[in-house]
Image (spheres, rainbow, N blue to C red):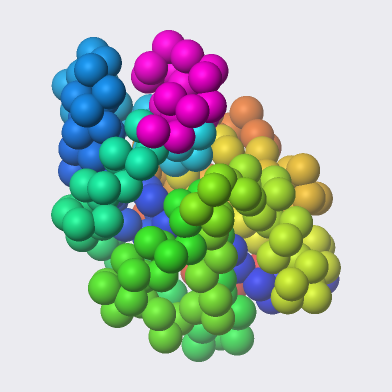
Amino acid sequence: MPFTTLLFDLDGTLTDPFEGITRSIQYALEKMAAPVPEADELRWCIGPPLWESFPLLLGTDDRSRVDEAIGFYRERFTEKGLFENTLIDGIPETLDRLTASGHQLHVCTSKPHAYASRIVEYFGLMPYFGKVYGAELDGTRSAKAELIAHILQEEGIGASETVMIGDRKHDLIGANANKVAGIGVLWGYGSREELEQEQPVLIAAAPVDISRHLSAG
């Protein structure tokens, strides 16, 4: 069965949010009186849910402290970090080809959908997507496996018709958990080795590789 529905991760896949995310994490850690790493040391935090990253950054599983840190993160991110972000070269052209060929596209991100929608709209990408799916502000559906299952149910689509496209293992683990095909992309924050371990149907070096592969399929 050909793939009809494509789920795109946001951070590291459609846009590069390095500056906004790392500066907002540094702001939160400073507010928490915790050690503040250099920005490059925080690259691993781009992709996973904040509820996974902050316990490691703070060295605690205390949910109240993690929630407090995430509150500080959002304080800066909502005002400034949201738009400290750049669009990946070649993404608009690829989305255009995919929609023209009849594919249905949705955003599937661990970022709260309230923020993700603003970013997608800011970069003029909203016309390409049916809906922007993301986590709730309390962290519900921040895990990709849970979010993909929710999208399949909400959209009434079969796993065999669907592809999850993202730059980190979390995207592909979520796809595999739902028996959805995965495509890993190399322009984001996951290494080839990280992606290969989850056995995607394709590892794309450039956005055009996605539309070429799906058109050939």
Boundaries of the magenta span: 52-68
Q: Residue 202: within the magenta?
A: no
Q: Nearer the viewer, residue 155 or 58?
A: 58
The residue shown at (48%, 63%) is 113
The residue shown at (81%, 63%) is 160
Considering only vertical position in the picture, is 45 above or below 152? above
Q: Position of residue 24 (x, y in %)?
A: 24, 40
Outermost residue to the front: 64
Answer whether residue 143 is visible to the viewer in this image: yes
Task: Tell me the quadrant of the picture where the N terminus can be found.
Answer: bottom right
Q: Quadrant of residue 151?
A: bottom right
Considering only vertical position in the picture, is 99 above or below 62? below
Q: Where is residue 210 in the image (x, y as percent from the top left)?
A: 50, 62
Q: Which of 154 and 177 is in front in this view?
A: 154
The residue shown at (32%, 66%) is 119
Q: Where is residue 36 in the image (x, y as percent from the top left)?
A: 21, 19
